[in-house]
Amino acid sequence: MPASHVFLTGSTGYLGSRLIPRLLARGHRVRALVRASSRGRLPAGCEAVVGDALDRATFQDHVTPADTFVQLVGVPHPSPRKAEQFRAVDLVSVRESAAAAAAANVGHFVYVSVAQPAPVMKAYQEVRAEGERLLRATGIDATFLRPWYVLGPGHRWAYALLPMYWLLERVPPTRATAQRLGLVTVEEMLRALVRAVEDRPAGVRVVEVPQIRGA
């Protein structure tokens, strides 16, 4: 497996802070966008780029020579009341990242989107779907991962829903929806992200919850 050179945003967040050590351990080079105040939180071996994920002018010149761009910026603990934050942070950041990646001739863009359609979190789904559209427009080969909810440290309340999901996934009328909107663990997400980095598609690949679980 040839090593990738990865440029990563959201480097100190829930997934980014766990993903970077795994990529480094597998021999990949990682350059991470980070605020100046958070630079010390990056693991040894990760190259820091101090900048603002909402302004590509602060990091665009540092994306090269990355062959893979991983976008993990997002408002923490999404909820319906954060619609304005989704547009101001999630959407702006993916727009800026897509433009920076295109300017740097990055070959593969990995984007954590969200399962869709769904009966709730409409604003969040709309923003992530728009992020996918922006990335498709660049023509860059891309992997879109579409989890619904990621279980893990600090995200444990949804474990109470597992019995309901177990039932819904076994009833034909609700099976497809329950699988698409199923819960995944942080470990499953990290494996899926590593696999996405190491297995570049030709064109656009969409990875839904069942595939995330099986990564």
Image: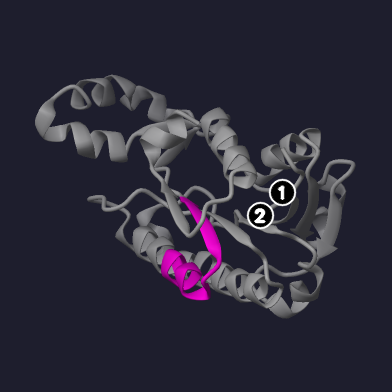
At x 35%, y 59%, the residue is 125
Extreme-left residue of the structure: 173
- Expressed as whole percent of the image width and height from the top left, the position of residue 5 reads 77, 53
Residue bearing mark 2: 10
At x 73%, y 35%, the residue is 22
Secondary structure type for disc 1 = loop
Whether residue 115 sits left or right of residue 155 in the image: it is left
Above-or-below relation of 35 to 20? below
Residue bearing mark 1: 12
Q: Magenta part of the protein: which range?
A: 131-144
Could you tell me which quadrant the N terminus lies in?
Answer: top right
Whether residue 127 sits left or right of residue 162 in the image: it is right
> Hey, what amino acid is under mark 1?
Thr
* Front residue of 11 and 194: 194
- Counting labels gives 2
Secondary structure type for disc 2 = loop
At x 45%, y 36%, the residue is 212
Whether residue 34 sits left or right of residue 108 in the image: it is right
Whether residue 173 sits left or right of residue 113 in the image: it is left
- Expressed as whole percent of the image width and height from the top left, the position of residue 27 reads 81, 38
Determine if the magenta segment contains residue 135: yes
